[in-house]
Each structure stands twice: as structure tokens, then as C-alpha cells.
Image: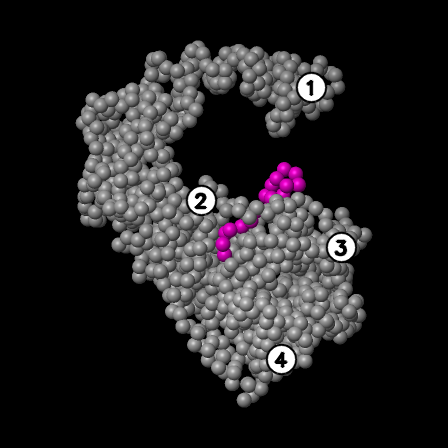
Amino acid sequence: MKTSSESNLLQRLRAQGGQALAAKAIESVVEEIQNRFKGSRREGGVTALRRYPAREAQVVPFPDFIPERLQEILRAREIENLYTHQAHAAQLAHEGKNVVVVTPTASGKTLCYNLPILSTLVENPDARALYLFPTKALAQDQLVELNHWTEKLGEELRTFTYDGDTPQDARKAIRSRANLVITNPDMLHAGILPHHTKWERLFENLRFVVIDELHYYRGVFGSHLANVIRRLKRVAEFYGSKPQFVCTSATIANPAELATRIIEEDIELVEENGAPAAEKFFVVYNPPVVNPQLGIRRSYLNETRRLAKAFMLRKLETIIFANSRLATEILVTYLKEDFAGRPGGPELVRGYRGGYLPLERREIERDLRDGRLLGVVATNALELGIDIGSLDVAVLAGYPGTIASTWQRTGRAGRRQGSSAAILVASSAPLDQFIAQNPEYFFGHSPEHGYVNPDNLQILLNHLKCAAFELPLREEERFGSLDLKILCAHLEELGFLHQTADGWHWVSESYPADAISLRSVSSDNFVIVDTTAEPRVIGEVDFSSALTTVHEKAIYLQDGQQYHVERLDYGERKAYVRQCDSEYFTDAISYTKIKILEHFASEPAGPAIKNHGEVQVNTQVVGFKKIKFHTMENVGSGDLSLQEQEMHTTAFWLTLPQPLLESMTYSRDERLNGVRGLANALQAVGTLLMMCDARDLGVAVGENLEIVEEDETPASTSAKPAVLVKIFEPNVYLYDKYPGGIGFSEPLFRLSASLLENTHRLIGNCACSAGCPSCVGPIGEVGEKGKEVALAILDQVLSGAQTSKAQ
Amino acid sequence: MKLEEKLRELKQSARKTLRENALEQQLEYLRRLEQRPRKLPAQKVPQSIEHYVEGKACSNDRGQYFLAQEALPSGRPYGKFRIDDVASADLRPLELFLPGMVLPPPSSVVYLDTETTGLSGGTGTCAFLIGIGAADGPGFRVRQFFLRDFTEEKAALAALTEALEPYQLLVTFNGKTFDLPLLEARYTLARMQSPFARLPHLDLLHPARRLWKLRLESCNLKNLERELLGIARNGDVPGSEIPQIYFDYLRTGSAAGLQPVFFHNALDIVTLAALTVEAGQAVTKAGDGGDCDSRDLFSLSRILERVGASELALATCQRALDCGLPDAVEPHALWQLASQHKRQRRYEQAAELWVEIIRRRSSYLVEAYEELAIHYEHRRRDARKALEYAEAAVEHLHENSGSPSCLKRLTHRQERLRRKSAPSGSGAPRRARGRANVLPILSG
């Protein structure tokens, strides 16, 4: 009963000019937060407050090419004209151009592709379109949207989703009847392309391919998608069609570049935004320091709870984003407690994340749209374009990792009228601290770049197998930029292909797409088997992270449950675990050795040298630390001897020449620690610049090749210390943690000035006295002087760089 | 100064290697990663297919292909049949399995089987050997279209289309899910019209299952061949090895390994024809009271029931029971016979059979209780007796944790019957009484 009266109240508020009230409420909370939590950037509190004024809609009449029938449907939905970006994108697509549209959340971007495509489909009953969404939930959402059109257009528009959930008996009809097929890249890769003869009608008449949420396809996934698109274009060409591409993307720095890399064709960029926006506040909040020695701050989850509660108590609909499932559940629990005794009760707060049943998720989405909820705590599952309407406030518990993702999430708050607010609550992670202390980086920079490397050899070869399975590879064909003949000869040697007069044919019984997952480089996974009761598989870990996360005696975490790894069967690729309740988690210690195989480029960076090229990375997990939850104390360790892993990949590295280090008045150990600390900080900022996960970018400190070789000769053992001191000239490597590289090295090389400047800022502005996990790493790892030396090195490099620039 | 030297050095070493070399190096590295190094067969002097298989290269406007032909003379024995049984068979009884179709004479029936580069399906699986067989006068002729290389596929497919022209019925074994979709895909890939749209198709797998599943453990082709035709193949090449044999041939050019594959394919086709004859005879024999396994009779009764030949189905089922069925099968037959009687409104006969099922306490026990409860409630109007059966059913379901929906239905019936059978005026709720009065009228 309480629930309904509460939501009635909310609805009434909105109906009776509630917008103004909401705006007032927001302003008052923002003011209150600002006053109550004033503080310095280092110590915490509100470190930035921005106000974005309201913006009017920019509209134009419907373009002429839109058939009258469609215009009528639009008018029936109270759409009388188009935003400028919609009209522009639709016009370009109508002219046959490839288009990528970049606009914020809730700016009506689906119309950008639906208008030109539906116009074509209703005029030409044979024409076909294929829509790609990264998740099934988004595909369902689009189906609902398109059903509005289907209701009016009837048989002219035959839209279906085709994915793993499509019933077998419906598939045949969809293949021949649908003129608009909604699917995902994985299904296109493993279900549609290898069976393209069954899709003859679609491929003969394929006019449009839509790639929604393009920014999602970065790194490995994007590199795979680019290859799937190569295959799609081959198949379409075989049936005599040449589809044009319409992509949409959240704001990233290089949408046109990313789109071009993925579709490998010229593309027109539409980025002016004609959608209206209401006034919006953006607050960056850093929880205050409670222990200056260790740089410990107040819990960001508790602070998130307090802030969210302050908004919700003023009847402002609030969405709280957390970065993990566990954090989501914790916040839901806290906020439900907060509302337990109040009108409306705990039902006003819900959680939303992957792992909830689809029906439950649809219900929450509906309740959000209808304003029946006051708060929802979500993971990035709600970040993508699922329709939940707009809310008043977004509270971000922790920096989402990228500027683009931050804007996506904060875009969830923002109504057409009235005000909205977004608050970023920083955690103690290095990136969070960097953003909280350098908010101008966040506000001043365009969001991150999206990088892909479709010619990553392993990824390319895998898709080449699929391509040959689909249609024989002709000698004169192009598939990426590498030499197809050499690649095919390689696959022939392995027994996958056979060359005849008309090209290379697939000669294996296997179905290659089944062995290739688009969301990782190799499909070589370790299976996690829970043996607590009846043995059952609870998950998978990809090969590269298996050795550090499921080694014996590791604590493996999944869905908030802890598991102790009892046994790792390397040959069978299985880890046997048992549920446990441990006070600590484990952090693997690995030893990494890097050998440079090829320099692609080298340039001076002040007194240092920056390089990028190809490297061989040998990694061995040699032990692990036990770290206590919450306090992060090191409470023990263990030794391990696991097989050494070898990987060829690409890397960016910084060479710190001998004179630079020798000019500093520190001991050898202090210098070494400083370099290590610098490496840790560089990795954090590199991750920020590359818009990637910390797991994607490896870091290592290595000495120069000549020295390592000398080091290895047994004769020089006695002379070793002297030699080392003399020519200590370390390299700091940031390497792509995927065999073959995933495209970070070259951009890091290009953006090294920004990398170094921002690393300096991260370390320099950190509140800790001598190093903490938020900057160079804990004192235990980098010593008392680590932070100081790292800063000193950067000072030299940067001032040197400026001098040389001035000259 | 020192730095500049260093940079010059670095620049010189950079890009020294050609891109191709770098690629070769990376490939070498991947090769080492490859977990299962393949053993390539030793290169011998390759001997072409003509050397091992009777046949010749043919050509049409699509190019060349290899055609092997074998004529089996009419008198040759084939298990319990002779080859001329194919040409003289009466296949009309098989119309049972192709409703609405008039079966053509045996001379217009073509049998097809393919050997492929895999079982996974999809466009990367190719039929490298397509065999067809048909009566040729009193004898039987097998033709095999073979791709000496993938480039011969279009010519082979065109030749197949032409070869299928004279026939009016295509028979395969599991062709509905495997051979035909695969060939359809091959025709699409060749941008050619497939011949199968115009050609009616009988996939013998399904009739075989319906006819013989009760009697035989497995209805795969090999087992049917052994059990029904009495043929045991010696040294036949296992189907799973066939793709690799073809791949090895492509790589080495040596056709030695292919000979058994051609043989295997030809045998499958002749067996398919013989089994088709056997299926026709099985229907005929069961129908005219010939010497026949009781399980086959019961199977036929089910088939007849499916096509709506109720009287015949009932008589056949009765005969199967009269001949004596194994314990595992008999309750099914009793239940079916009862259902057939019920459908023809011979309720008393049906009731006798339900009682019999209950007497045996075999499978269909709950169903029989329920049927009897219905029978006594609505037809005999004996609520008390009906209640006994309903209670027995509920009790049995409780004891054996039967399906909840079934239990719910029967409990409902039981409660209603309790109200009905209670002496009138005992204070049963009015609403329930009202319904109880209506129900018998409704069920007529």
C-alpha cells in the first residue's frame, strides 16, 4: 500500500509542475553537498562543480525522401520534425553513404538509421537490412521500438530478432521472410555467415548493415568484429550485394577512425547534436582522507550511499552506478535499509545487473520508465542504450574507467525540462584519484580513443579459417593488409586449407566458428569446477589470466562468493575449487622478462627515449601474496612454480638513459624503486588514455638487452654488481596483453607527451606522503623514496622535453 | 652526442626486416604454439582415381568430373534378396508414409547417398562423392559422381541434375536432415538451381523407425542391413574416417584410400534400395496376415492409426496381441487398442481393456484408472464406482510422486465424485451440487 501512495505522490509531483520543484530540489542538494563537503583537492570533498546550461532543440522539417506513410506514423507519435543530426544522418544514408552518428544518450539516434532504412524497405519489398547490437537485451529493445512501426506498416516491415534465443522452428521462416533482421556479432559470426546459403534472400538483397553502440567494439572485440565484417562483405559480394553501413556511437575521440577501421570503407561523421537538453550539474566528489600516512580515505561506497540518500529523500529519481556486481548488491542493501522505515519502503529501491532474470530486468526497466521507482543501483548493464526513460540524478560509485563510459552513465540523468545532476564519487583506485584531483582532465578532454587491430595475426588467422569455410579464398582477394598467400600457405601446411586452381578451400571436418569466441583472442579457456558438493562448472577464465587468478591456493572470486583453488590441472585446462569464507584474497606475483624483437620507431622524449615495437614477453608466476579484505594488509605469501608463458606482442617503452639516472642523488635501490613506481603510475594513466581495462595493458621494467646478455654469462658473476651499477639503463614497458598486440603501442607512442604529463599529475597530486596504491604503489613495494624518485625522473623528462620543444 | 648515436643505431635496426619476414617469424611462433603437430602421410608416387575405381572423366558445359558406374546383374543375391527384387518390387504400400502421393513404378525411383568432408554442416562441408542407384531393366545400376578436386563440383552437380531427370521419387536414408540440405547448399554456392524442389522425397529413416523400432535395438543403416537383409560387411571403412581419407587424397594425389569409400557408398545405396523393398513387403505382409513378427504388427497398427485407417489399425493391433507381445510392449498395445475402441465409441470393449491394464498393474495404470473413472461417471452414471477408480489413481500418484498437473486434475475429479456420490441432502455446498447436475448432461 505504501508503495502505491508513494509513487502516486511522485507522479502527482511531476504532473503539477514537478519539474520546477525537482530543479529546486537538485539545486538545494548540490548546494548542500558543496557547502558541507568543501575541501581541498588532495584532502577530499567536492573537487569540481560544473553547471551545463539548458540547450534548445535544433529542428528541421522531415526530408522529402521519407514516404508520406512514415511521416504520418511519426506525426501520430507526436514527432512533427527532426533534430538536425537525425535529418543529416538520414539524408547521408539515403544518398548511399556510410554514416557514423555520434550523439549522447537519449538524443534519438535510432531514428538516424530507422528513417532511411524503413523508407527503403517500404519502397522496395525485396530490400533487406541487418542490425547488429552487442547484447541480446539491446536487440530486444530495438525490436520493441520497431514494433511501433510494424503495427502501422503491417506486412511491409517484417522484423525479427535472430539469436541464441530464437526457437529452432521459427528460424527457417525468419531466414526467408524477414526484411529486417536484428542480431548480434556472435550470432552473425557463428550462426549466419557459416550457413549463408540458407540466407540467400537476405544476402542477395542486403542494402543496410547497422552497427549500434560502435564504441563498444574496441580492443579484442572490435578487432574480431572488423574481421566478421570482412567476412560479411565477402559473402554479400558473392550474392551480388554491397551493403552500406550506418553506425552509432557514444562520444569517443575518434568515432570516424574506429568506424573506418571496422568497416574498412570511407564513412561520413555526423556529430552535431540537435537534441534539447535541460540544465545539468556535474559534481566530482572525493571522500576525505582519514589516514594521511597511508593515504586512506573514507569508504566510497558509504559516501555514495549518503549522497544517493540525500537526493532520494527529496523525491528525486536516482540511478546509482557501481563498478562490480558485489558493490551493486552492497549499495542495494544499504539503501533498502535507509528506506525501510519510510513511506514507500524498501521497494522503492531496486538493483539491476547481469545475472538477474530477463523478466525481472524488463520489469525494472518498465518501473523506471513509469516512475514507480525512486532509486536503482546498476552495473554497466544499464549503461548501454536500454530504454529506461530519464531520471533526475546519477550517482557514480567509482570512476567507470573511461570518460566515454562516464558520460554514458551520467547521461541517464537528464530530463527534457528541469534540472538534473550527476555525481562522481571517487574510490581509492589510481584512476579515480587522478580524476578527482585533476577534474579538468575529465572536463577538458575529449573522451578516449577506440582502438582495434583487425590484423592481429591470431585473430586474423582464425577468421581466415571461417572465411575459407564460407567461400573458397581466391588468390587475388584481400582480407586485411597482410599477405594472403603466405597466410593461406600456413593454414594449408596445418591441414586446414587446400589450394586448387580457383583458390583455397576448407578441408577440415571442424566448424571453425565454434572454436572462436569474439570476446577473447584465443578460445583456450580454463574451466572452473566447484567441488564443494556435486562437482559443477561455475565459470571460465581465459588462458592469459588463468595463471594469475586460479593458481593453486588462490582465492577465486565469483558473484561475491569466495572459492579456494585446490588444484589446477594445466593439461586438462581445469581448476578445481571449493567454496570458502576467507578474510583475505590473493594477488599473484609474476616475474616478467621482455626481449625487444623489432623497433618500429624511436624518438627522444626529453633526456629519455620513447619507442614502440615488437617484443617477446616471458612471464612466470612465482608466488602470491595474501591481502586482507578492507584493510589491504599483506598477511602472508606462498611460492608457486608454474610453467613459463611466452608471448609475442607489441609494446610502448620508455628508455631511461644512464646519465639521466646518474644525475640524481639517490642510491641504486632508490632509483630502481622509483622506476618501478613510475611504471605502476604509467600503467594506470596508459589504461586511461587507451580506454582499456587494466588487464589489457601489461607493465614491466627491464634492463637493456646488452646488459641482460652480459648478465647471463656465468664468467662475469663476480663483476656483476659493478657492471650493473655502471650501466643501469632501464626500459619501462607498457605492452599489449594479447598475443600479436591489440593496437595500443602505436597510439601510446604518439600520445606519450600526454601520458607523461598526466602521470606526473597523478603522482604529484596524490594525497599520500610517500606512495600508495592510488599512485606509484604502496610503500611496501616501492620503498620510502619511490614516489619522490618517480616524480624526479618525470620532472627531468618533462622539463627536458619542453626545452627541446622550445629549441 | 651519445644519445644521437644510439638513436641512429635504433633507426637502422628498425624496419630492417621486411614485413614478410616478420610475418614468417610470427607464423613460426604460432606453429610452435600449435598443440598437435600433424603427421603428413609419406609422399608416394600418386596414383589417380582411375587406377583404383572403374570409371572415367566426363565433361559437360560446367567442366569436368569423374563418373564411376557399376551395373549389378539381376540374378546377383543381396542378402535375403536378389538384385531383381528392386525392379520388381511393389512399393505402393509405402504410400502410407507419403500421404497424398501415388507411388511411381520401381523403375522411376532413384536412391541417393553422399560422402562428405564432414558432418558439421554449413557451407564448408562438401559432398565429394554423390552416389545414386536405380533399377536398370531387371538389374540395378549405381552411378557415382566424384570430385577429383573442388573445381569439379559445378560439373558434378550439373551431371547429377541431369541424371535425376527421369525419376519421380527420391529415396534417401536421413537425407531430410543431412544429404539434401547439404546438396541444396552446394547448389546455392554454385549458383545453380537444385533438382530437389521438383522431386518428391522419401527419407526411409522415418518409416524404418516406425516399422522396426520395437523389434530392433537401433535403426541405423548398418544395423537394419544386418538384421533385416542378413548382410555383414567385412572391412568396411568407418564413416568417421572418410573425410580424412579424402583430405589425404587431395594433398597427396594418391587415390588408393578412396577405393573403399566408393565401395562403401555403393553398398549403402544398394542396401537402401533393398531396405525400401523390405519396408514395402513388411507393410504388405502385416496387412494380409502373412507370417510376421507381432511387434511389427503392432508397429503397423500405429502407422495405420496415424493415417486414419482406424478399422484396419484396430484389427492389426488385435492380431498383434493375439500373437503375443513381449511384456515391455504389450501394455502399449492394450492401451492403444482401448483407445481405438473408445474413439469408435465401443466403450464396453475399451473398459474391458482398461480393467485388464489395471489387473496387470503395468504402465498406463493411472491413465486406465482415469478412463474408468470417466467411464463410470458419465456413461455408466455410477459415481460410487467412478470414485473408487479416481481414488485409486490419486493414491497411486501419491505413492509414485506422479506429475503435479495430473494429480491436480484427478484430485479435482475425486472431490467432485465425492460430492456426487454422497447421499443427497448431506449438506454439500449448493454451488458444487449445481455443477454436478450439469456435468452428466454436458458429457452426454
Instruction: Kindly identify which numbered label has been placed on residue A106.
Output: none
Q: Which residue is painted at 36% across and 16% down in the image?
A: B286
Q: Is any atom of residue A59 visible in this view?
A: no
Magenta highlight on residue A527:
yes
**Could you tell me which chain the residue with mark 2 belongs to?**
A
**Residue A662 or residue B310, whichever sits in front:** A662
Mark 1 → mark 4, Cα distance in angstroms: 103 Å
Q: Is residue B272 above or below residue A667?
A: above
What are the residue bounds of the magenta stretch? A521-538
Question: How was this image coloured?
Answer: one colour
- Identify the residue under disc 4: A662
- Measuring from the top left, give residue B265's x and y in whole percent: 29, 34
Which callout, 2 or 3, points at the residue further toward the start of the chain?
A: 2
> How dense is the environment of label 3, judged by Cα within 10 Å: few (below 14), some, or many (20 and up)?
some
Q: Return the residue at label 1.
A: B419
Residue A131 in the magenta stretch? The answer is: no
Element type at mark 2: helix
Residue under pointer 2: A171
Which of discs 2 and 3 lies nearer the camera? The answer is 3
- Secondary structure at badge 1 equals helix
Work out how far the residue at label 3 is from the one at label 1, CA to CA, in angstroms.
Answer: 55 Å
Residue type at mark 4 is Glu
Single out the residue that lies furthest toward the bottom: A807
Separation of marks 4 and 2 at Cα, in angstroms: 70 Å
